[in-house]
Amino acid sequence: MMDIREIMRKLPHRYPMLMVDRIVELEPGKRAVGIKNVTISEPVFTGHYPDLPILPGVMILEAMAQVGGLCLLPEEGGEVRGEDARVPLFTGVDNARFRKPVSPGDQLRIEVTVLRVRGVIGKIAAVASVDGQTVAEAELMFAWGRV
């Protein structure tokens, strides 16, 4: 489990690009479940779309990548500060599918499973759901690097 303070110690992202509010399940290097509370106050909704606010699919992918990155970090340490700090950087996406729209007021539940890690490269499977219904799924690739 991680609250927002610990997430901010581990990820370099900040508002408006921090896309995970809480980690509710975590098996480092294996799987994780994160929560993103979608609110109307997010800047993306001023233009996507003013009369029908829908969270863009690319933002859902970013939320998946952030939960995946947290899952791939070592259990101890992993902070993004310091000379030797390294984080998993999102490098690619395969098989992305968007099943249903995500709107303000929805709680996005992101489940990730590590498929493989070889050296500095990793791949995860991710599923995002709202109220138990799948809204998006994808496979994401990572490479370890410095920010």
Image: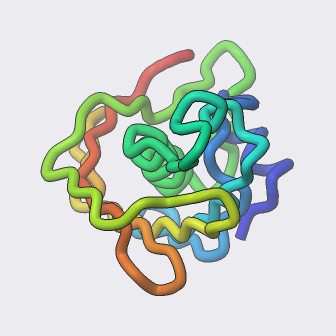
Instruction: Please report the residue visible at 69 percent of the width from the left and 44 percent of the height from the top.
Output: 77
Identify the residue at the far bottom of this view.
132
Q: Position of residue 45 (x, y in %)?
A: 62, 38
Rendered view: 133 above or below 18: below
Q: Position of residue 134 (x, y in %)?
A: 36, 75
Q: Is residue 49 left or right of residue 76?
A: left
**Along the horizontal axis of the image, is 133 left or right of 52?**
left
Task: Give the residue at x 66% y 74%.
Answer: 24
Residue found at x 54% / y 70%:
109
Q: Quadrant of residue 91?
A: top left
Image quadrant where one finds the C terminus: top right
In the rendered view, tell whether residue 68 sits above or below residue 47.
Answer: below
**In this view, 55 is above or below 43:** below
102 or 114, which lies in front? 102
Residue at the right extreme, as displayed: 5
Foreground of the two, 106 or 53: 53
Residue found at the very far front of the displayed protein: 51
